[in-house]
Image (tube, rainbow, N blue to C red):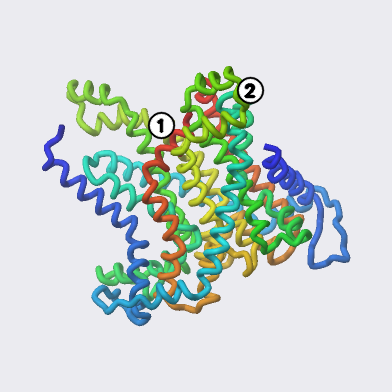
Amino acid sequence: MTYLIVTTQIPLVATLYLSLHSWNLLYPARPLRFVGWANYTFVFSDPVFRMAIGNTVLFTVSVAIATTLIGLGLALLVNRLTFGRGLAYSLLFAPFLIMETVSPIIWKNMILNPIYGLLNFALTSIGLAPVDLITNAPKFAVMLMIVWQWSPFMMLILLAGLQSVSQETIEAAKIDGANPWNQFLHITLPHLVPYLCVGMLIEAILILPVFGPIYVGTYGGPGNQTTNLMFAVYRMLTEQYEIGRAAAGGIITAVMTTIVSLALLAYVRPYMERH
Amino acid sequence: MRSSRRQIGPAALTFLVAGAMCFPILWTFFTGFKNEPDAIAMPPTVFVPLTLEHYEGALTGNYPHYLANTLIAVVGSILAAFALGLPAAYKLAFFPGRKANDILFFALSTRFMPGVAVIVPIFLLYAKTGLIDSLTGLVIMYTTLNIPIVIWLMRSFFKDIPYELVEAALMEGAGHRAIFFELVLPLAKAGLATTTFLLLILTWNEFFFAVNLSGHGAATLPVYMASFFTSEGQSWARMSAAAILAVLPVLAVGWIASRALIKGTLSGAVK
């Protein structure tokens, strides 16, 4: 516990402290100087950071929604299996195990490459024009990579939910003549609501600081179009050495995460207290 | 029970979808066996002579250096996280105080904190103390990331052990150290394995801290893969082979232990 406090809380407080100061490592002669909220006003007015904040929200929300829909579809499919469940698990679980620097390499080159990619092959073989997603729809391309990686995660959470649906209720509904669609709508879906909420909130917390697909897939480009907060801070720190501004970006990311975490906590806590 | 004939359609669809989800990985695996011209041929080639050259080449090139770094960072941080986290998990499982839930959520919140919230001072501190581009630095950082998971999961596995057992041992005058090592840990073997697997996957794949805190010397496999084209040139077949080799250990662990992982992690999250 002490170790955790030392390695997480102290850096957090230090980040807060640094975010109120101006300091650039490239100019060692200029010492650390207190500037109040100047770094924050910079972050909120700088076009790159504004783009980054918008993208952070966009990527998080749209990926959470897309993976929920895909994950639900996958979970419903796998849940019906009476054989080969292990194989289906293994195949569907694989994208989640791939490191976040490898999946964008695979997508960017093997699939989305405008000349040699499989997508181009698929489009041209059905008579459509090839599309260069990375250049023309970079945001969509990045989201595609993240969705591919995170859909299995959602599938797992929803599978756990599906396996705890009361079979008696389903049987009773069948006897009452409810068709499968009605069974799903009135029994399964309401039962899944807590799983959906918790899954989406956890996913939002984990996807908000997504980094690999942006670093490898697009390097934040073209023209900062796919830069998110995580990536903007990384560049501010390692390329411009603007310590205060990078820290301010970090604190803003932390605040956004905390808001989602508090929502999750508010949702889960009553349940935890009962157990 | 539905008749088996009605099962075939949905099942076939399920495997089709599962295959499609996994297809990019399988295609990459296959491309690693092709000769370079076939790897970038358009339309894509299937029936071409295959070669082991790229997988062998990847194994003898830079890969071993990064693999060794990754292994050291993973094993070191998992051992440290167990050493520091298990006592806390034991205490929270069998002797929770009134603050147990607060402690648990605090631990979890540290894991959920995005890397950018702490990277700046850590980067400065590492630069000052010479920990930049050192495996020690990465192990320290990864231990921090792993402790909350050890606490959460191991606590829930410990809670499966009847408290009466621990109580009885205490009555007989056994010390906590003896109870922990001789009674509790052996009973939580499966949980230890599950937690180890999960930490292995997460640490093996960690990229943000690795790319910020390591240069060439201590870089791990994710960092190597991110810079693959700048360091190894634009070779698709070689890239595919290297990518598969980089993810293979984690895929293997994930596949072998998938049931235990899924069950254990989910139950750890809800108990």
| Residue under numbered circle 1 | A193
Question: Residue A85: where, in percent of width, then height?
Answer: 27, 44
Q: Secondary structure at mark 1?
A: helix
Residue B148 occupies which quadrant of the picture?
top right
Residue B54 seen in render = yes
| Residue under numbered circle 2 | B97
Residue found 30% across the figure and 68% down from its top = A123
Residue found 58% across the figure and 37% down from its top = B86
Nearer the camera: disc 1 or disc 2: 2
* Image mark for residue A218: none
Q: Quadrant of the N terminus of chain A?
A: top right
User: What amino acid type is highlighted by mark number 2?
Assistant: Gly
Question: Residue B234: where, in percent of width, then height?
Answer: 47, 78
Residue A215 occupies which quadrant of the picture?
bottom right
Viewer-side residue, A160 vs A261: A160
Residue A148 seen in render = no
Q: Answer with left or right where residue B233 lies relative to residue A52.
A: left
Residue found 49% across the figure and 35% down from its top = B186
Q: Residues within 10 Å of mark 1 (few under 14, many from 20)?
A: few
The Cα–Cα distance between marks 1 and 2, rounded to whole angstroms, is: 32 Å
Q: Chain of mark 1?
A: A
